[in-house]
Image (cartoon, rainbow, N blue to C red):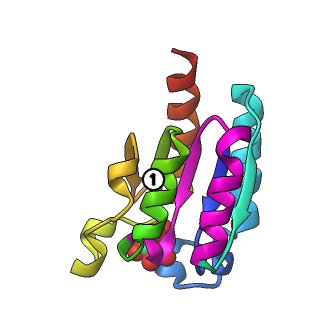
Amino acid sequence: MLVLNGPNLNMLGKRQPEIYGRETLADVEKACRAEADRLGIKVEFFQSNHEGALVDRIQAGREANAAIVINAGAYTHTSVALLDALNAAELPVVEVHLSNIYKRESFRHHSYISPAAVGVIAGLGSHGYLLALQALSRLLAR
Ligand code: DQA
């Protein structure tokens, strides 16, 4: 499975900890790897602050990956390109947000990428990534 993180998520731990918590992206990755081991699945991680780099990674992962977990950061609310890339990948996608985007500014209430997702998890912090891995592993086992 491919776990993608978008812009500013490399700043986790330092960035608005009152919203995003004190865990770093490396901590999130470690927890995901432990969960993946438990589930018996392989995970690849990729973070970029650049929209095109995320599109490239989704395209490159089309054959090699069975599913995608994505926290697109602010591109969630702006990127038709990411929506198109996710649709073209034809893989099950779970969209994750650390914060509850519906509790925040109204511009965060709309996600361009949700139509490409089988499910969306928001507001549960880094635990959302683990729930996404569980959900996708269960979906693929059906
Ligand atoms: C986020 C929510 C987005 O609105 C924001 O731009 C982010 C992080 C989250 O994980 O809560 O960068 O995706």
Q: Vertically, is 83 above or below 79?
A: above
Q: Quadrant of ligand 1?
A: bottom left
Beta carbon of the mark 1 residue lies under 8 A of ligand 1: no
Q: Is residue 62 magenta?
A: yes
Q: Which residue is mark 1?
A: 95
Report the residue that reaches farthest toward the left: 106
Residue closest to the eye, 48 or 130 = 48
Secondary structure mostly seen in magenta is: helix
Does residue 105 appear in the picture of this structure?
no
Q: Residue at x 77, y 33 (%)?
A: 37
**Which segment is the magenta one?**
51-76
Locate residue 111, reporting x and y percent: 32, 65
Q: Vertically, is 131 above or below 58?
A: above
The three-letter amino acid code for the residue at tag 1 is Glu
Q: Secondary structure at mark 1?
A: strand
Report the residue that reaches farthest toward the top: 142
Q: Residues within 10 Å of mark 1 (few under 14, many from 20)?
A: many
